Image (cartoon, grey):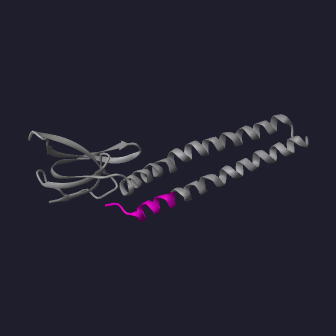
Amino acid sequence: MYTEQELTDIRAQIKKRWIVLVIPMVALLVGIIVTLVIRSGRTLDDVTAQVIVDVCSLLIAGLLIGGHGLAIKPLSCYARHLDGMLHGMTHTIEDGTFSHLDTDESLVEGVRYRGMTVQRFNEKGKPYQQLFYFDAEKPIPTFTEGQRLRVTYHDRTVVSAEAI
């Protein structure tokens, strides 16, 4: 369900977004430095220089906080998710019975998931429901209620699920 290429693509996209974010920040930083140099030569009054420095600093902070939160953090969370799916410790259950898959999505640790419930049996033969997170970016499986499944998971997130 997951490939190394997906992880590589996400990391490349993160790098591109950082570059796009850093370019205007560097331009604003250069503006601050130039303003301070001109002010030290006394060709610019202190109030004007301070206003320019303050505005540039606020714009840098806004770009860093807003750009990271909107453009980079979601991809970083998904990259961490993919890394766990590909390289983390996984477990497999062979005796699950599909109960249902939520149609609503939830945000868990920055990644969008759908809840997938699988019925299992404990050592005494009593049934219980086990909740897994199914990646909302992946195609919705076409399992029917009561279908037996083999589920491989990392933490509580489905790495792969197949009917048996």
Give the overall secondary structure of the magenta segment: helix
- Residue shown at 63%/41% (left/top)? 61
Residue 88 appears left or right of 52: left
Give the quarter of the figure containing the C terminus: bottom left
Residue 33 appears left or right of 125: right
- Count of numbered badges drawn on the protein: 0
Q: Which residues are magenta?
A: 1-13
Question: Which residue is at the front of the view, 141 or 58?
Answer: 141
Question: Which residue is at the front of the view, 3 or 14?
Answer: 3
Does the stretch in magenta take in 51? Answer: no
Q: Where residue 30 sits in the image (x, y, percent)? A: 75, 50
Does the stretch in magenta take in 9? Answer: yes
Residue 85 appears left or right of 147: right
Q: In this view, which residue lies farthest toward the top? A: 47
Q: Where residue 56 sits in the image (x, y, percent)? A: 71, 43
Question: Which residue is at the front of the view, 22 or 58?
Answer: 22
- Residue shown at 78%/36% (left/top)? 50
Residue 26 appears left or right of 119: right
Give the quarter of the figure containing the N terminus: bottom left
- Residue shown at 60%/52% (left/top)? 21
Q: In this view, which residue lies farthest toward the right? A: 42
Q: Where residue 118 sits in the image (x, y, percent)? A: 18, 47
Q: In this view, which residue lies farthest toward the front? A: 123
Q: In this view, which residue lies farthest toward the left? A: 125
- Residue shown at 46%/62% (left/top)? 8
Q: Where residue 32 sits in the image (x, y, percent)? A: 76, 45
Q: Tell me the quarter of the picture where residue 115 sits.
A: top left
